[in-house]
């Protein structure tokens, strides 16, 4: 099974997907319609780029900030949470999912481009 299908099979996961860093393609599985998933992938890519810019700025302020390179980000709202590691995104229902379990799985199974180069 793929990381995306494993995530979607996790209780409380609404949808999961993958986007390209170029922004020209995405795939997804779960309870989102195509247009919502497309917009989600655009939002996740844009936020990932912003997080990378911000950590680069922190690195210049303090060379050993411990946050470079960033592996991902999380935004928790009232009803659902968006988790991104590398270029994999996951939407979870806060009432029926464990953020800790989802993030532990993503940290263990999603390889970032920086890690591939090592």
Image (spheres, rainbow, N blue to C red):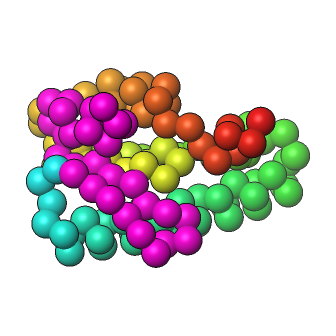
Task: Name the foreground residue: 42 vs 73.
Answer: 42
Q: Which picture quadrant has residue 26?
A: bottom left
Magenta part of the protein: which range?
Answer: 1-29
Quick check: 43 left or right of 10?
Answer: right
Q: Quadrant of the N terminus?
A: top left
Q: Quadrant of the C terminus?
A: top right
Quick check: 111 left or right of 27?
Answer: right
Q: Which picture quadrant has residue 49?
A: bottom right
Residue 45, magenta (yes or no): no
| In the rendered image, the vertical position of residue 73 relative to residue 24, given as above or below | above
Count of numbered badges drawn on the protein: 0
Residue 5, magenta (yes or no): yes
Quick check: 32 left or right of 68?
Answer: left
Name the residue rendered at 47%, 30% in the picture: 109
User: Where is residue 9 drawn, in percent x and y?
Assistant: 18, 33
Task: Name the foreground residue: 113 vs 82.
Answer: 113
């Amino acid at each position: 099974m793929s990381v995306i299908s494993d995530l979607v099979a996790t209780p409380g996961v609404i949808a999961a997907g993958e986007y390209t860093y170029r922004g020209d393609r995405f795939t997804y599985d779960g309870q989102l319609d195509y247009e919502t998933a497309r917009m989600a992938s655009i939002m996740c890519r844009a936020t990932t780029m912003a997080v990378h810019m911000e950590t680069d700025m922190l690195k210049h302020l303090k060379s050993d900030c411990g946050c470079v390179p960033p592996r991902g980000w999380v935004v928790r709202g009232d009803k659902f949470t968006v988790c991104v590691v590398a270029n994999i995104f996951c939407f979870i229902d806060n009432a029926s999912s464990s953020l800790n379990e989802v993030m532990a799985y993503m940290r263990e199974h999603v390889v970032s481009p920086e890690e591939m180069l090592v």
